Image (cartoon, helix red, strand yellow):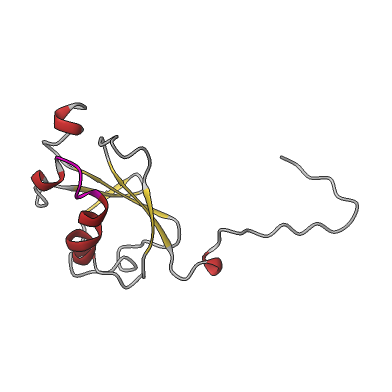
Amino acid sequence: MSVTAIGKYEAGSHDGAAHFAQPLLYVGWDEHMVFSAPAVLALAPQTRFDELVRTVLPALYGEHPDFALVDWSRVQWFRGATMFTPRMDGTLADHGFGHKSVLRFRTPGLEGLRGSCG
């Protein structure tokens, strides 16, 4: 939407990194629509990927009936739309995640609640 102003107009962004204690990371589990939208987490850039898998994801998705069945060795990881292979000892920053980045994961063999998307 365009703005017509009678004087100098300076609109500032209110969702920039400077407004948050930690960068925001959007996290989504593909094909699992029990969760209607990605979770938004404030995570330190130094958060290790193995910590994300061991503690953060179970806290988010552990109540899902299929979560305990995830074979983490087969998970497909995406930074936005680009597939990548994470180093478990690497940090979010090491993997290129910054403020408002998107992390998605797909679990082959677990397509939706009890196979509803497969």
Q: Is residue 116 visible?
A: yes
Position of residue 58 in the picture relative to residue 41 (left or right): left
Q: Give the residue drawn at x 14%, y 36%.
A: 110
In the rendering, at what x and y percent does residue 34 appear?
28, 36
Quarter residue 118 falls in: top left
Q: Is residue 87 visible?
A: no
Q: Is residue 7 magenta?
A: no
Taking the image as shown, residue 83 lies to the left or right of residue 11, namely left
Q: Position of residue 36 (x, y in %)?
A: 36, 37
Which residue: 29% across, 34% down?
A: 33
Please tell me which residue is depicted at 34% across the width and 44% down the height of the picture. Answer: 81
Bounds of the magenta segment: 61-65
Queried whether the magenta region covers residue 64, the answer comes back as yes
Residue in the picture at 19% in, 32% down: 113
Residue at the extreme right: 6
Foreground of the two, 104 or 37: 37
Q: Position of residue 102 (x, y in %)?
A: 37, 51
What is the chief secondary structure element of the magenta stretch?
loop
The quarter holding residue 38 reads top left
Left or right of 107: which side holds 27? right
